[in-house]
Structure formats: C-alpha cells, structure tokens
Image (cartoon, grey):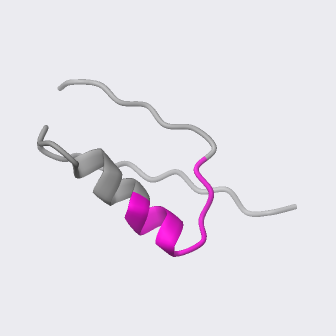
Amino acid sequence: MAEKHTISVLVENHFGVLARVSSLISARAFNIDSLTVSTT
C-alpha cells in the first residue's frame, strides 16, 4: 500500500498561486487525491 501524506500550505490570494503550487506537486510525480481551498 502506498504511503499517504497531508500537506498544508498557506498562501496569499493572488492570480495563479494555486496553479503554481499544484505544478510544484505534480512536477515531483505526486498525485493530489483531494484539495480544499478557503479564505482565512
């Protein structure tokens, strides 16, 4: 069974930030099973 990890990231609400974060994760061949986005 594959290992599962949880990553928490807090970023400013700017255009393209979510795309950049998800690109960093996928560039390392990690799969994103779920994603939660909200304001703080």
Relative to 29, does residue 22 appear above or below in the rendering? above
Q: Nearer the viewer, residue 31 or 5?
A: 31
Q: Nearer the viewer, residue 12 or 19?
A: 19
Would you identify the image quadrant in which residue 24 lies?
bottom left
Percent coordinates x, y for residue 22 in the rendering: 41, 55
Percent coordinates x, y for residue 19 in the rendering: 33, 51
Residue that extends furthest to the bottom in the rendered view of this protein: 28
Percent coordinates x, y for residue 21 in the rendering: 33, 57
Count of numbered tags:
0
Residue that extends furthest to the top in the rendered view of this protein: 39
Q: Is residue 15 left or right of residue 35?
A: left
- Region rendered in magenta: 23-32
Quarter of the image with the C terminus in it: top left
Q: Residue drawn at (22%, 48%), measured in percent from left and top?
A: 16
Relative to 8, does residue 37 appear above or below in the rendering? above
Percent coordinates x, y for residue 25 in the rendering: 46, 64
Q: Residue drawn at (59%, 65%), measured in percent from left and top?
A: 30
Q: Residue drawn at (43%, 31%), measured in percent from left and top?
A: 36
Quarter of the image with the N terminus in it: bottom right
Q: Residue drawn at (73%, 63%), measured in percent from left and top?
A: 3
Q: Is residue 12 left or right of residue 39?
A: left
Q: Is residue 25 left or right of residue 21?
A: right
Task: Please check the rendered image and state whether residue 1 is part of the magenta-colored stretch, yes or no.
Answer: no
Would you identify the image quadrant in which residue 33 lies?
top right
